[in-house]
Image (cartoon, rainbow, N blue to C red):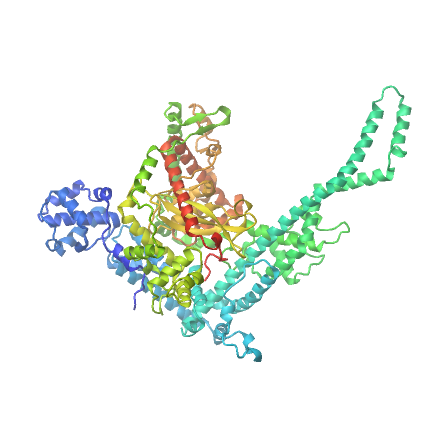
Amino acid sequence: MTTLIILSRPEIKIFENPPQFQARARKKYFAIPEWVSEYLRKTKSPSAKVGFILQLGYFKATCKFFGKHTFQPDDIQFVAHRLGITTQFLPRNYDNVTVMRHRRTILKQLGYSHFSSHMRMQVKKEADLSAPTQMRPKEIFSSLIDYLYQNKVEVPSYDMLAKIITESFRKYEKQLSETIERELTAEDKHLLDDLLAEDDVYQSPDKQGVKIKRYNLTRLKRANHSTRPSKIKENLEYFLVIKEKFIKLQHATRSLKLSPDVIQHYATIARKAQIFQIARRDEKRYLYLLCFIVHQYYTMQDLFIDILLQSVQRAINHARTEQKTQLYETRKTRSGSVGSLVDIVNKARDILAKQDIPSEQKLQQLQKLFFRSDFQGSTEDIDVILKALKKETAKVAKDEDYFDALEAESLKLQNRVSEIVKQLEFNEATSNAAIIAGINYFKQRGGDITESAPVDFLEPEEQDIVYGENGKLRISLYKILFFMTIFSRIKSGELNLTHSYKYRSFDEYLIPKDTWDTDKQALLQRAGLTKFADFQIVQKELAEILHKQYKMTNRHIMEGKNIYFKAHGSKGFSVATPKEDEEEEAASGISDLFPKGNFIPLGEVLASIHNATGFLEALDHAQITHIYKRPETKIFYAGIMGLGLNIGIKKIARISTSINQNTLETAVTWYFSPENLDKANDIILAFADKLGLTKLFERDQDKTHTSSDGQMLRVAGDSLNANYSFKYFGKDKGVIVYCFIDEAHRLFYSTVVSSAERDAAYVIDGLMYDNVVKSNIHSTDTHGYSETIFATTHLLGISFAPRIKNFQDQRFYAFEKRKVYEEMGFPILPDETSNTKIIAEQWDQVLRFIVTIKLKETTASQLFRRLSSYSKQHPLYRALKAFGQIIKSIFLLKYIDDVTLRQVIEKQLNKLESANKFLKAVFYGNNQEFSQETKTNS
């Protein structure tokens, strides 16, 4: 059985060789505790003494043993000098029996276990659990390493882990193949094989001579992101084909129990491969095609929901704009009518105010004013004006003009979303019953609404307005209110799809409830979260920390030690943050190490980096097997430059010598996946980590400080991922490129998000991508902050340190009552008492939520998007927010008290500004606009 290629050769070399320590790390890991000194006194051989210390230090750093021939020369010299040994270390003098005895001693003293055959079985079980949930071997490799760390087990060789993962993958693929063979009927196979047939349009006589023909599979691969009715209709035509096949094949997909990652993996192969490549895969082609059908069914339903949301929002915006326009246009008419009445009222008041005439004469003058020629109109005119004003006032009070504007928008919206609603499959078990009844009625009637249409899903004022003065149902208004209710229920999590990547109910994204209830302790252990199992213990620890921080922060203020704090009486306080004195000197010192005024061709830069790191070897073929000859290195360079410079693959091929466009496009299709590009970046980051230069940027080599921020970029063409933002894009649409950076300026993660979303939902995604850079403290600006992020990062073992705008206006929380701190005379007081009741009630669900993220069952951004849609109603959201308020209060008190912390946060966030400048300089093609409509166009 061929072993899967999990790590590239450079990565394997790093994994199988001792770490390269800098001076500070060398002192830390090769320190000699008392028990080691005692052990060495019994050891006679100088080489054995040096070898023992080296094995111990390397193991403490990596939980792994390395061959004696791989020991680093600088480390040998350092340890020998520390031990006062002058003789040369020779591997042959450090015999294998002694090596193994030393390893057993190290394991025993550090409390670790040997990687035995029993432990191999346990790791194999862990790999078997991971294989059905995702198809990225490197992710499983990392999770197995974490599993060994948490269980204090020696990390074995790369070959051992690679064989275990390969066995798990092959076992899972065999199970899939057997299930497909058992479940698929001849009719099912014919249905799937039809995807590999030519489009029916070529059956007509006039099309017989066409040389390049499109296949059914090709026709169904891509969907249009436009909200134009004609494009939506095209999407629906393709979707109906997919839907028919999905329904007929649903019995097989249920039996396979495919995870989203597995579906996407095999569907990607089907989408990228040519027809003949799939057709010759024998029985395995049915797995590819089945996953393709499921994937397209999920993604197209998500696409239709995105279209519906965007179309309804646009209709609402247009109606509000029309309402304002109508109000402005009627202002003149209304002003004239009101002016006439005011004139009459003023004259009447003048008459009544006269003191020199009797009441009878005043009455005569009033009658003359209202009923004779002094008033240009008649009493009927006054009645008409009064009636019109009364009607208009009532209309404004009930927002009737807005509903009229909505009614005018209804037809355009119906053209876009009526058919979408008819075809979507909503989950009745997890959705609001009233709107489900309305949707079912709409589907059953084919969109033809009658007086018997259900209105329970509408708000009370909408139920009143939807019937006209004659008591008849206003059909157009009903429909747009119906679509708006669907819009709001999807947003609030009260209306969910059955089959979807993005719009299922929140609970479906978490670890299944029955699995959690049965295996909770094992899952907590796998995630390394057992210390949080009991909330009472967690609460006690946090209460002590928070109380101490209140005392420390306030005492430093009261004693005058916090010279940057300034009280403003009833208006609160402010805290100044001076610039770090050493920052400019350090920065200039580092900049002196780089060459000045040199221009280096980008191809030469890429070649130099590859020669040093071998990063191109991370660009593997999308298929695990059946891989063709690898393209030349120059092809990969051209692909990187074409995409990275945003000039496109076709243009880079045209302007380059000896680059064939078809070869380049094929290479980009099969090798340039997001996962591969991440792996390549990881190799470069790991290499940079070994350079002494990167250590100059680190304040504390035991902690890694990272930060994240977004950069706005325009999107050309139709894309539902892009949104309007006049502030950033004018009249155009755009997205946010959200990047993560560490102290050494290493950009270790990036993603593209909608400009309509808050950055906070994506902070955890970057922190969980910890293959190379493992963050200990993370900073963002205000957009990346939320109280739920404070809670999540704390439970993941990461300190969250954002720069919050007007942070002094934030509310402070405590376990104690405010009076306790008032009696101490503290200037910084808690505003509220922490809601520990909701936290305690939901703690089990909080842990389930965090374990789901930690074990990478679902991305944090997906969970936060669904959870935040429920807003304050969801008890888990409230519990996370309440817990986050505690962590936030501890941070804010430290932030006020520690000027160094404030300076470090400021400095780290400034590093992203330089990274964003670099992005703009490099990504210069096509007016710095994305031409892709989705995150991964292939």
Asked if residue 204 shows in the view, the reply is: no
Question: Residue 70: x percent and y percent?
Answer: 19, 54
Position of 819 relative to 892 (above/below) = above
| Residue drawn 37% across the image and 59% down it | 676
Nearest the eye: 274 or 922:
922
Nearest the eye: 52 or 91:
91
Q: Residue furthest top?
A: 356
Question: Residue 640: x percent and y percent?
Answer: 39, 58
* Quadrant housing residue 27: top left
Nearest the eye: 215 or 139:
215
Total marks placed: 0
Question: Residue 405: x percent and y percent?
Answer: 69, 49
Question: Residue 141: x percent and y percent?
Answer: 32, 57
Q: Is residue 175 left or right of residue 35?
A: right
Q: Quadrant of the N terminus?
A: bottom left
Asked if residue 115 shows in the view, the reply is: yes
Nearest the eye: 569 or 518:
569
Q: Is residue 555 left or right of residue 713?
A: left
Q: Is residue 656 left or right of residue 150?
A: right
Q: Quadrant of the C terminus?
A: bottom left
